Amino acid sequence: MKKDIFKKAIQKNTEAIPLSLLETESKIKNEFIILDELRDFISPLSKEESEGLEQDIIKDGISDPLIIWETTPKVAGLKNEETKTVYVLVDGHNRYRISQKYNLDFRIILRNYKDIQEVKDSMLNKQLNRRNLTLEQISYYRGLKYNIVIKNQEGLPKTVNVAFNLAQEFKVNEKTIRRDAEFAKGLNKLTPELRQDVLTGKAKVNKSDIVNLAKVNTGETQSLSSADEITKTIKKDKIKSHPIDDNKPLNINALEISIRELAMNKLDKQLCLILLDKINTLMNYL
């Protein structure tokens, strides 16, 4: 009962809160945790956005409350089983960072989510409702939403056309949504810093390269940190995908397709040598 009164009180912020409940609020403020998985899920602010937010808060204080998820260690994916309840920061990571820098107070709102996936869905929907997104950010968040829905449907009968539904929601075609999904997969193979630079236009990386990166098996733990690494990874994968095996019968059609695919890429010395080798192989056969 006290918890319900506390929740309503700190959400409305208009009625007097009993001292015991104020003590509970203070306790939550001091004990809530930050999960890297949630902090890094949404792209961080650019340097300009971060500085602008900081100046606004210095001037006007922290007006928007931080959203806190009240849950259990097991649901939050934590190993700590000593406590029955944990509090996790969902929204307000930048505000909290600034509050700590300048020793500023802030309000909180408690929210309940069934699992961490529902938390991410909420975070994603909030991002998609922003008005100041770049075209790359819109594409990324649409793709993330598609990939999340598809992942949640794994093992279930495929009765819903996810791409069609999202295309209707965002007023684009299905092909765009599917390409967004590949774009999101590729971006998630980058470090958070490089991903943010790509989304804000600071790092000049072709969108097609990011889409191609999505198809490359980079390993679960590898995060690419530069545009050069992206290019090298894609080229390395293309080399692996176009080997010449002298012990196998020559497949002319496959060889011609391989040559065309290589010729369409920006060639470096290594790829040129591979292309020449394939052309010579084809010439010798003809």
Image (cartoon, rainbow, N blue to C red):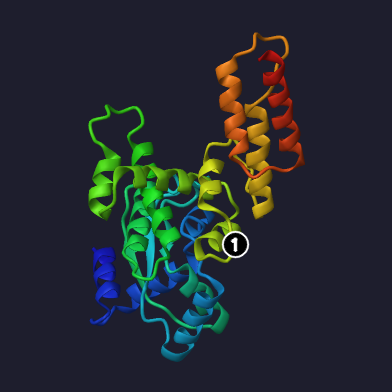
Apparent side of residue 245 relative to residue 57 in the rendered image (left or right): right
Q: Residue at x 55, y 53 (%)?
A: 206
Viewer-side residue, 258 vs 67: 258
Instruction: Describe the element under mark 1 as helix, strand or loop.
Output: loop
Quadrant of residue 264 in the image? top right
Q: Is residue 115 visible?
A: no
* Residue 107 visible in image: yes
Instruction: Name the residue at 60% across, 27% down.
Output: 258
Point out the image quarter for the N terminus.
bottom left
When the figure is inspected, residue 151 is found, relative to residue 209, above or below; the finding is above
Of residues 126 and 160, the one nearer the viewer is 160
Q: What residue sits 53% from the left and 83% below the top? A: 103
Residue under label 1: 203
Residue 3 coordinates in the image, percent (x, y): 29, 64
* Along the line of sight, the residue nearer the viewer: 95 or 280: 280
Q: Nearer the viewer, residue 84 or 152?
A: 152
- Relative to 202, say whether 120 is above or below: above
Q: Residue at x 64, y 45 (%)?
A: 266
State left or right for residue 54 relative to residue 155: right
Q: Residues within 10 Å of mark 1 (few under 14, many from 20)?
A: some
What amino acid type is highlighted by mark number 1? Ala
Quarter of the image for residue 5 reads bottom left
